[in-house]
Image (cartoon, helix red, strand yellow):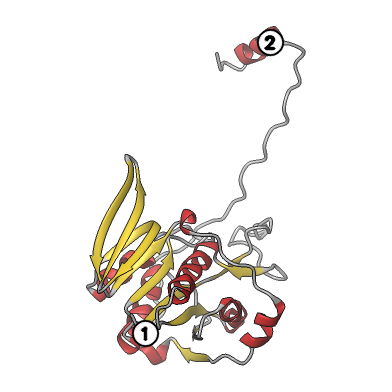
Amino acid sequence: MKKIIVCIKRVVDYNVRVRVKPDGSGVMLDGVKMSVNPFDEIALEEALRIKERGSNVEVVAVGIGVVDAQQQLRTALAMGADRAVLVQTDQAVEPLTAAHALLALARKENPDLILLGKQAIDDDANQTGQMLAALWDRPQATYASKLELQEGKATVTREVDAGLETIEIDLPAVVTVDLRLNEPRYVKLPDIMKAKKKPLDVISLESLGVAASVWLRAVKTEPPAQRQKGVMVKDVAELADVLKKKGLI
């Protein structure tokens, strides 16, 4: 194996309490902390572990989005990626557009493996990896909780309704990863400083021959309903009475 591409998406940090815009047109992003999508961070960690096991592998982090997404790619470089590529666009990027952009890069870079998080926590679409595999005409494995590589093949364990399923696919392939695959490493300050010297290329979406097509339109965004206050009861009998009045028993 010579090269692994890891897809990195810039999302609102999972610790941030998301607020909806007053007009309901979306969520407020001004001044909000942005981070690497947690599932993509797991995908990157797995690529780095493959490299550290002695494989002569180049790990390339790829992001698609606004110029500020360079910050998340620098985080990927600080974790240990060898280089990064930002496909810059100011337009909203839907899963199919992302898949086409990644396809163009795959044809240019010729990776042995492309790793993605199973979904992004901003839209929870869970579509890009599957679309990319179909467009690339290569095998795919989704929701990976364990990944083993042999000569020209990958063995992937994934969670299904009935338990665990293990499949074997030929490389090159697309694999999307789940939370149980690993725990990403902590980025240290010296690594952050070293990352500033690593190559980060910025190219435009148009240079890949991809247009940011809009297939979906958000009609309205609403915050979840506020939770009702709890009720304190003295004993089990009072609890049963409250539940009966609410029609729950």
Q: Quadrant of residue 244?
A: top right
Residue 53 shows in the view: yes
Instruction: List the residue tagged with mark 2.
Output: 236
Name the quadrant of the C terminus.
top right
**Going by the image, does 94 lie left or right of 170?**
right
- Circle 2: residue type: Val
Which is more toward the observer, 91 or 86?
Answer: 86
Residue under the image location 45 percent in, 82 percent down: 60
* Disc 2: CA contacts within 10 A as few (<14), some (14-19) or many (>=20): few
Which is more toward the observer, 52 or 216?
Answer: 52
* Residue 98, x across and y down, in percent: 40, 74
Q: Which mark is residue 105?
A: 1
- Circle 1: residue type: Leu
Residue under the image location 38 percent in, 75 percent down: 97
Above or below for 88 versus 237: below
Q: Quadrant of residue 216?
A: bottom left
Name the quadrant of the N terminus.
bottom left
Residue under the image location 32 percent in, 71 percent down: 132
**Secondary element at image label 1:** helix
* Residue 159, x across and y down, in percent: 37, 48
* Residue 149, x across and y down, in percent: 33, 68
* Disc 1: CA contacts within 10 A as few (<14), some (14-19) or many (>=20): some
Mark 2 or mark 1, which has the lower sequence index?
A: 1
**Secondary element at image label 2:** helix
* Residue 204, x across and y down, in percent: 46, 89
Which is more toward the observer, 228 or 76?
Answer: 76
